[in-house]
Image (cartoon, rainbow, N blue to C red):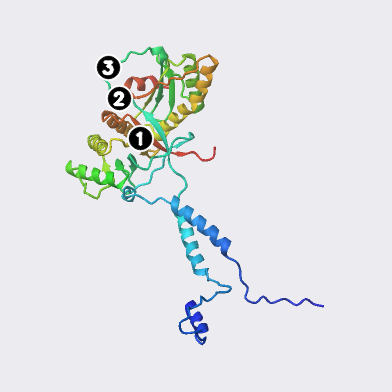
Amino acid sequence: MSKIKKKRVGFVLDMTPLVDITFLLLTFFMFTAKFRSEAENQQKFTIKRPQTTQDTAKLPEKDLVMIKVGIDSVENDTAFYLSMAGEQDIAKLAEAMVDLQFPGATEKTALFKITDSTWLGKAVEQARIVNPRAQFAVDADRRIKYRWIETAMNEMRKKRATTFNFVTDKKTGM
Amino acid sequence: MAGGGEGLGGGPKQKRGKSGKRKPKKRVGFRLDMTPLVDITFLLLTFFMLTTSMITPQTMEMNVPPELDIEIEVRESELLNILVRADGKVFAHMGNEEPEAPMSMKELRKFVVDKNVDLENRAIVTLKANGDAPYGLVVQILDELNAAEPEIIQGLGRNGINERKRKFTVAPYTPEDEEKVAGL
């Protein structure tokens, strides 16, 4: 006797566990997602950070002054890019920089492209006035010359910002 | 459309009594089509999964001494200079000695550990890097110095010292430094 294949009529699959897990994951990813800040939107370069083995602290999300040193992808020149974290700080810094008549500064500028040390010093000073609790972080491309970092360190030191962080990436593959 | 189906079923039924309360209809085997919900949820899930980056940047703390006009006298024999030449070669020497050959990262670490243990906390490590040296290399050295700390503490502990005072500074690279490492 040959087996007769049973026809499944109205086949229903219980989707509840699938939906449960999907929602769980969705919530997780939604809460952990970070959106790009205004300063990052104005950035026109990418930074290849130096890699370190040390498991050090994470970068704070507010009370932060970020000094990026990057190579512009279009003009191919190196410059400092100073920005702050947090909408209020960004707005206040922009206001202060417009008052100082920084070339090209508007109320909307979140990332200041600075090429000389005098302006960097002024910007660091303003940032410290805007938020005295802010920590400084230097995020520089590993290929740039050390001279740039030295200049930045000197300017920060002059403005009494003697503690700062170097932003690095964790070395993968120990 | 789900509501329409119910209405069709309930239409021909007569109401029992004019003043009587409406009896809630019991829904047996109620099913909700979840497919669109799952579709949207999956779409969002995929979007968030692909846009999130899990790698957060790390930080490395640095302390620089504030600008002081006072000259502090230090003994040359307690000064450990680390020099980074423009071509990326690393040299290390004590203040009263001359640098020899370029060092690898491993040798540098061993040198720093040995000197720190020998001098029992009195060593002052100074990093001087040429302006043309790559920044990545400088950070690599800083990382190496940080990694040497546990070894130094261990070494000091063997000598009966349980306290570690770290003295570390960054100093400008002078022409004299360049002279020292020029021919090596």
Residue B169 visible in the current orientation: yes
Residue B104 visible in the current orientation: no
The disc label shown at residue B66, or none: 2
Q: Is residue B21 left or right of residue B72?
A: right
Q: Which residue is mark 1?
A: A145
Looking at the rendered structure, the kind of residue marked 1 is Lys
Secondary element at image label 3 = loop
Secondary element at image label 1 = loop
Q: Marks 1 and 2, Cα distance to the nearest angstrom?
A: 23 Å
Quarter of the image with the C terminus of chain A is top right
Q: Is residue B68 left or right of residue A3?
A: left
Q: Is residue B178 above or below residue A168?
A: above
Q: Is residue A84 above or below residue B6?
A: above
Q: Residues within 10 Å of mark 2 (few under 14, many from 20)?
A: some
The image quarter in which residue A13 lies: bottom right
In this view, the residue farthest toward the front is B19
Looking at the rendered structure, the kind of residue marked 3 is Ile
Secondary element at image label 2 = loop
Discs 1 and 3 share one subunit? no
Foreground of the two, B100 or B30: B30
User: Viewer-nearest of labels 1 and 2?
Assistant: 2
Q: Chain of mark 3?
A: B
Q: Chain of mark 2?
A: B
Give percent across and percent down for residue B180.
38, 19
Q: Which residue is mark 3?
A: B70
- Residue, x 48% and y 82% (percent of image)? B7
